Amino acid sequence: MPRKRNVVKLMLMNLRLVFKNLSPILIASLVLLVWSCRDSDKNETKKMAVVVSTLNNPWFVVLGESAAERSRELGYEATIFDSQNNTAKEAEHFENLIAAGFDAILFNPTDADGSVSNVNRAKQAGIPTFCMDREVNSLDGPVTQIISDSFSGCVELGQYFVRQLNKKGKYVELLGLVGDNNTWNRSKGFHSVVDHFPELEMVSQQSADFDRSKAMEVLESVLQSNPDIDAVFCGNDAMAMGAYQALVAAGKADSVKVFGFDGAEDVMNAIGDNKITATAMQSPKFMARTAAELADKYLKGERDMSKKMPIAVEVVTKENISEFGAYEGSTE
Amino acid sequence: MKGRPSKAKKLIKNVVLLVLLAIALYNSVYFRPLDEVVKSQSDLSFDPALAAAEFMNDGMGQIQVANASDLISRLESDLNLTLEEQGKKLGISKNFYFMVEDDARVISVLDEAVLVGLGDGSGREIRIATDFIFGNAIREASGMFDIGDYQNTMDFNNISIELNNRVRDEIIPPFLKNIKEGDQIYFKGAIKINQKEPALDELRVVPLVLKIN
């Protein structure tokens, strides 16, 4: 037993000696380890989430892909999330991306009021949000909101509409999603003009949720009770294409003028072919790139940003279509 | 005998479940007429008519106004510099706005405007709009309203609608009623210039003040 005790004592002494001599090396190694970890954090690629209201509409596909592409060009890892026009789905995406530790969110909301809580949750988690195209009814939540000046675009479009119809006739209005501010900014801009011309009569105003098939169904049904319309004003280009299909089916495509909003590729082609009368060009590419660049600046420390950044919208007609490319405004 | 109470219990249980289910369904789904939703969009607490009235009554004195002839001269000599340094614009846009004033002589009364020659004797002409009073020219040229102050952008846009209504209802009718060719007038109003297509010889003023001298 005493022999064993001596062996243990000897071992402890040796260990103490080893630690005494190694401790400076150990401390230095530990410091280096921590430092290198910190350094590797710094070098780790930052992540940008692109949350888009729907990928069931080519315009939003371009918006999402352009945001992701610009983010990658700026050195970020970018992931696109599709909310499928569903605020609950969008909330799920926010929960996941907060848990996954994304650094910033380029956000195209599903609902001006319903999406506010998602933005606030991200803000509480320290993740800045940058709204694209659609706004949320909050000045505190998002860092900035890059939106189309839909109202002014529809004021211009409304004036063109009035002149094309010689200030008289019957028309139908197809609205977008009723919870989206763009729906009402466009409708209000249009009505701020056309309502001052008493011989222009709106025979029906219905929502088709920015959806092509729904627009076709709605207009088919409206045409049953109002076969003598002169024009259809649509809150977006997808609905304009749906309305045009309904008019073709009813044999009225040549006599009824269709107006859209977006500058989508199929509508731009249709304007060139005299099928659609006009649209308002809002560039998803420009908006998405601006959002990604602002997010990058914010992550690098810039804080001087306007709460809302409207981007001008331009009316595209057969007369000026050569100045535009699909999804690209001449503002660029 | 034993089966009866249990059947009754089962029935009561099913009825209660059905009632609960009906209540849950009734409260989870509701329909609102589109007209009601449209109305609720305009039933916001912000009063754009009041904002427009306050601007027309008290805010006019605070606006920065340029002499129309001088501004056109500056635009002719260096368009981009003048637009960037002195123009106002909303967000990212090629449209710039200015508030201008000048004395002028009426050349002719047109369908949608009154064509006037500016008082500097330069032969420059400008159109005073009397119809198609739409858009944001007055709101933007005034520089008195900031989109960042409005939670819902429609509140901001409603200010333009109300300002245009005031111009359409109060400024233009008495002017049009009394104006004739050769009259000397004073005007103050907003102009919009597109950087890409400035069309300086076709400028159109949305009037805020019109006086026949």
Image (cartoon, coloured by chain):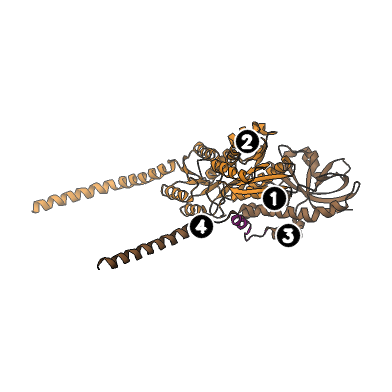
Chain coloured brown: B
- Which element is circle 2 on? loop
Q: Nearer the viewer, residue A44 or B94?
A: B94
Within the image, what quadrant is residue B39 found in? bottom right
Residue range of the region highlighted in magenta in the rendering? B35-47
**Residues indicated by labels 1 and 3 sit on the same polypeptide chain:** no
Within the image, what quadrant is residue B144 found in? bottom right
| Distance Cα–Cα, label 4 vs label 2 | 37 Å
Disc 1 target residue: A192
Disc 4 target residue: B30
Q: Nearer the viewer, residue B96 or A296?
A: B96
- Front tag of 1 and 2: 2
Disc 3 target residue: B53
Of the chain colours in the picture, the one used for chain A is orange
Q: Residues within 10 Å of mark 4 (few under 14, many from 20)?
A: few
Amino acid type, label 2: Gly
Within the image, what quadrant is residue B126 found in? top right
